[in-house]
Each structure stands twice: as C-alpha cells, then as structure tokens.
Amino acid sequence: MAFRVSTPADVEAIVDVLTTAFFDDPLWGPAFPDRAERPRQAAALWRLLVRSAQRYDWVWVTDGVEAAAVWIPPGGVELTGAEADDLERYLTDAGGPAVATEILAIFATFESAHPAAPHYYLSLLGTHAAHRGRGHGAALLKHCLAVVDEQRMPVHLESCNPANDPLYRRVGFEPSGRFVAPSGHVVTTMWRPAAGI
C-alpha cells in the first residue's frame, strides 16, 4: 500500500472519503440532522477543513484516496484567521443557522480540550465506505505516525467513536481525558507520547 501527501487535485476525493466515513458517526452524524441533506452539508465542512489544512502539506492519503488523514502540525491551527472569522456565515450558508450553531459549539469544545504542549493534531481520519474493513485507514495512520516519530513529537486526537479506540491504542495512544459535546455525546481525548520518550 502506498501513501502520499495530498494535492489540491485530491480535495473532492478526500471530501467524499470523509463524507461517507463520518455519515453515521455518533458525534458528526447528528450535527447534520437531516439525513437527506447530510452529505451536502457535511461535505461543505470537510471541504473547508481539507483545503485549509493542505497549506501545511500534512493531509495524507492512500495512493488511490481510499483513506485520508488530516493533520495539523505543532503550532498550526485548523483554519486561517480569515476562515475562522467567516466560519459562522459559511456554515449557515451550507446548513442553516441550527447546523451552524451546533458545529461552532463542537469546535469550541474541541479547542478547549487541546493540550498546551506542542504536538501534532490528528483532526480527521477516515476510510471511504466502499473500502472499509480492508486496513486502509490503519495503514495510513501507521505511516503518518512513523513520519511524526522521526520528529520526536507527541500526537493528540479526539475519539468521537469508541469503536475506533482499539485501533488508536494499538498504535500507542492512551486516553487522556473526556469531555461532553454540546449534543451530550462523550468524546475521549487521546495522547501518544513522542517516540523515544
């Protein structure tokens, strides 16, 4: 299996991966309550996050874009200042005021859970529904972590779906905390120490 840093030409394929991967996610699914509109509304959010994160050259994909991982490097932020300033309008245009309010509240809760110490942040990891169960996501994650390990940096993530926790534990993550999202869903924060420490 081959892996590479994504390019702007991959954006729509990555958005498709994330839209299918998170469609029934216990946190992100209900954030878009109209299931008929969910693919379009969620895709708008993923598109914004992917395009913004690509400025760091840390959005990784399997070679055929069966899986994607969106990373924010140490000192980075998910959105530029201009994107953050425009986020409420953007989300309202994409999903309406109720969806915008829910997503903004989720983002604020996630932001408050980020550790102060420098770290890589695994923002999103997903496998396209058509390729699920074949190890693409796990292999991509292991590859990315090997690159991070060369830099001797720790990693933080938020696990919204307990079904994914065993995978994260297998590659060195441990639960570091929990918080309750505005919807009432419990999210587990996880931390992977820097290699060699």
Image (cartoon, rainbow, N blue to C red):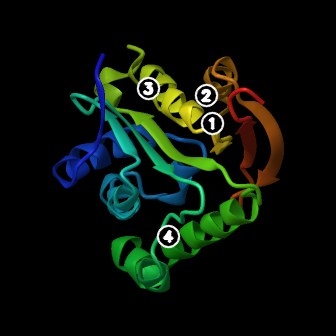
Q: Residues within 10 Å of mark 4 (few under 14, many from 20)?
A: many
Nearer-N-terminus badge (1/4): 4
Please report the residue visible at 54 percent of the width from the left and 66 percent of the height from the top. Answer: 77
Tag nearer the camera, 1 or 4 = 1
Tell me which amino acid carries mark 3: Gly
Please report the residue visible at 39 percent of the width from the left and 71 percent of the height from the top. Answer: 95
Tag nearer the camera, 2 or 3 = 3
Residue at the spot of label 4:
99
41 over 138 or under it: above or below: below
Q: How many marks are shown on the rendered structure?
A: 4
170 over 193 or under it: above or below: above
Marks 1/3: CA–CA distance: 15 Å
Q: Quadrant of residue 106?
A: bottom right
The reply to whether dot 2 and dot 1 touch (C-beta < 8 Å) is: yes
Q: Secondary structure at mark 2?
A: helix
Residue at the spot of label 3:
137
Residue at the spot of label 2:
164
View extreme (right): residue: 177
Residue at the spot of label 1:
161
Q: Quadrant of residue 80?
A: bottom left
Q: Position of residue 101 (x, y in %)?
A: 57, 75
Q: Is residue 46 left or right of residue 122?
A: left
